[in-house]
Amino acid sequence: MKIVIVSESFLPQLNGVTNSVIRVARHQRDLGHDVSIVAPTRPGPEFEGIPVYIVPSIPLVKFAVGIPSLALANLLDRIAPDLIHVASPFALGAQAIAYAQRNSIASVAVYQTDIAGYLHRYGMAVAKPMVDRFVASTHNAATVTLAPTPIARDALKQLGVKNLAVWGRGVDLDGFHPNNRFAEDTIAFRHKYAPNGERIIGYVGRLAAEKQVDRFRELADIPNTRIVIIGDGPERARLHALLPAGSVSFLGSKSGRELQIAYAALDVFVHFGTEETFGQTIQEAQAAGVAVVAPRSGGPIHLIDSGVDGMLFDVEAPESPRVAVQHLVDDAALRARMGEAGRRRVLGKSWEAVNDELSHHYDVARTRVKRPALA
């Protein structure tokens, strides 16, 4: 069948939405489907043989934000898709869903961003009721909405969204692997960033206010440790100024083998963000066999069994993250035990398995839509 993936984000932007779109597009192409991608940005007219179309956008905080226009409708008219997959719908995604509804085309909307939570973080909580209504109306127009966790599903249900199902995210079990810790390039990484054998505390992800990376200052003086921050974003300059250069290294964005090495070199992975709908980098750290510390909030609750395969800290207790990290830094056996348990937890979450599940949701969506008979 013809599948069009409409995404609010794509390469060269690197984030969870982009990564998910790439994995889905590859999988559906390999199954023999005719796949196209529509987004505000693109690396070129094709990505690994998959056509990529760009639509009008406006710049907002260093990102291209797609805007509704006739260009999208005209493009979808030409392609005539059998199904439209919408990744993290906002303005562009809402138009694609509305198009699908008008034209009796199955649509699958993937909920990936807690927009209302971000508004609160950025001091715009007054807009939450309006945003909640927008989210509800957008997703109710979709044939199926896929939430990343039961918590996210229930939150959408409270907004009045119907036709909900849970679909998580996959993880590269071969690329992110505990055996990478013994590779020469990983050992070289540790020698470079922890030259005196310090424990390495790390973070991977966007450097944005909602990720709360500034809280690493609470960990910067833990004895015999170094901190590495992997990623880029609008907060990078402020974080450089805020976090002590003597104990914190900023590595910028990494991908491929470099990212695999970085995960493998960590002793403890820490995520401070309390507004994550999922937490893909947590799964990647678990796949690499790294002990994880994350907030008891949102997506991480469904990714970590605290005390078994990671540690969830109390978001209401300011000292809780430091206590958890210090505990892991001091106890190598505990780190190893939690790292191994984390790896076991994600063994059934390969991208192949997760995307096979997505194909089932596609089938469900198509059965719910009756296409008009040809004259």
Image (cartoon, helix red, strand yellow):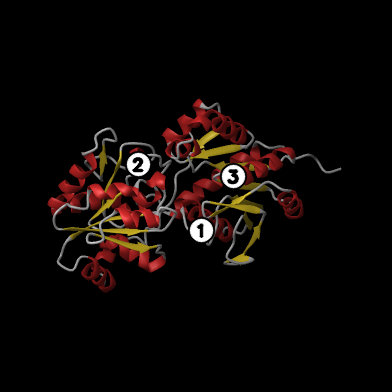
**x and y percentages locating residue 247 in the rendered image:** 22, 59
Residue 163 shows in the view? no
Q: Which of marks 1 and 3 is nearer the N terminus?
A: 1
Which marked residue is nearer to the observer: mark 3 or mark 2?
Answer: 2
> Residues under labels 1 and 3: Cα distance?
26 Å
Per the image, the residue denoted by label 2 is 300
Res. 243 image quadrant: bottom left
Q: In which quarter of the image is residue 101?
A: top right
Circle 3: residue type? Tyr
Label 2 neighbour load within 10 Å: few <14, some 14-19, many 20+: many
Structural crowding at the residue carrying mark 3, measured as other residues with C-alpha within 10 Å and reported as few (<14), some (14–19) or many (≥20): many
Q: Mark 1 points at which residue?
A: 13
For the residue pair 255 and 367, the one nearer the viewer reads as 255
Q: Name the residue under label 3.
A: 362
Rendering coords of residue 12 (x, y %): 53, 62
Residue type pointed to by label 2: Pro
Please indicate whether residue 265 sits to the left or right of residue 353 in the image: left
* Tag 1: amino acid: Gln
Circle 3 SS class: helix
**Res. 282 mark:** none
Q: Which comes sooner in the sequence, label 3 or label 2?
A: 2
Q: Is residue 86 left or right of residue 327?
A: right
Horizontal side of 3 relative to 201 (left or right) equals right
Query: As displayed, is residue 118 above or below residue 216?
Result: above
CA–CA distance in space, label 3 to label 2: 26 Å
Instruction: Choose the circle earlier in sequence order: 1 or 2.
Output: 1
Q: Tag 1's secondary structure?
A: loop
Separation of disc 1 and disc 2 at Cα?
Answer: 24 Å
Judge from the rendering whether residue 368 lies leftward or rightward of residue 288; answer left or right: right
State the residue at coordinates (17%, 49%). Answer: 328
The answer to whether mark 1 and mark 2 are in CB contact below 8 A is no
Residue 166 on image: x %, y %: 47, 38
